[in-house]
Image: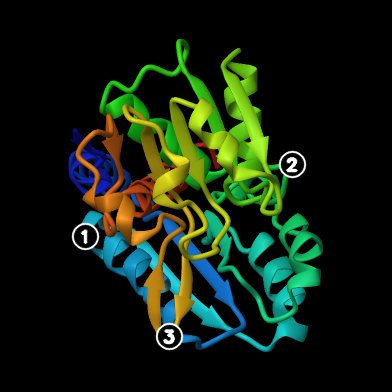
Amino acid sequence: MKILDGATLASFIKERQRRQIANLVSSGITPHLLIIRDSNNPVIAKYVNLKIKYGEDIGAKVTDLCVPTAELSSAIEKANLDPTIHGIILQLPILEKTQTDHITSLITPTKDVDGLSGHGNYDSATATAINWLLAGYDIPLASSKIAIIGRGKLVGAPLYQIFTASGYDVTMFHRGDDLTKLKNFDIIISATGTPGVVSDDMIKSGTTLVDAGTASENGVIKGDLSPGIYHRTDLKAITPRIGGVGPLTISCLFDHLIQATTLR
């Protein structure tokens, strides 16, 4: 059984990115990523700090800006006009979730390195990271029946678009659908943010499982896959509890940042 270790793949990407940024810096340009958020929630702060650390490792500048919810729009509009800022991320979730679509839509397309606005220059970073992860471990997509659970704009919806555009056999499941049908699929990608929503009895032997869902329970980050699944030895491949999709998502963000910097 393969372990879909995104951290290992990300380490190779980081080396390439270090060289690219060193070349940019030598020409007088330092890629600058602005992360805007409205919460000091420890889980959100953890994800922000991972991006800051990654940026430090490869020589990019990362600014963390926490503002009240009412000031998110104006902060984005100001950053759009700042030529020293090459990429903008709205760190989700925000406190007023109903405002997410509106606020992300304000990010100028050339700076939307997370790919959340729906009209940006880049695909969703998380969806792209999943594509990279499966390709990096030689998981065949064209000959597989693929299930995506969750239709969120961060993962499920953009990944469905990417896969259908490539002509893959993909089915979208929503949170309330009958998930016992998952036994008919070769690759299952879950991104609901509901801990343990995919249970051991839903999975057939030889399946590839990608857990792209995260939720916090009492300060502990949990995924969509139930703990029992990790005791299976008859799977084709599975993401680890930590270090699967997440590290590659950050790598993809900074790939987009480098592109945004060079195309300015």
Horizontal side, residue 97 vs residue 210: left or right: right
Q: Quadrant of residue 120?
A: top right
Horizontal side, residue 236 vs residue 182: left or right: left
Image depth: mark 3 or mark 2 in front: 3
Q: Quadrant of the C terminus?
A: top right
Residue beneath disc 3: 42
Question: Residue flagged by tag 1: what amino acid is it?
Answer: Asp
Looking at the image, which is closer to me, 40 or 107?
40
Q: Pinpoint residue 104: horizontal percent, then vertical percent.
A: 71, 60
Looking at the image, which is closer to me, 213 or 31?
213
- Label 1: which secondary element: helix
| Residue 195 visible here | yes
Label 2, label 1: how far apart the Cα atoms are: 30 Å
Q: Pinpoint residue 116: horizontal percent, then vertical percent.
A: 65, 51
- Label 3: which secondary element: helix
Image depth: mark 1 or mark 3 in front: 3
Sequence-wise first label, 2 or 1: 1
Residue positioned 77% across, 59% down in the render: 101
Q: Residue 119: which disc? A: 2
Residue beneath disc 1: 57
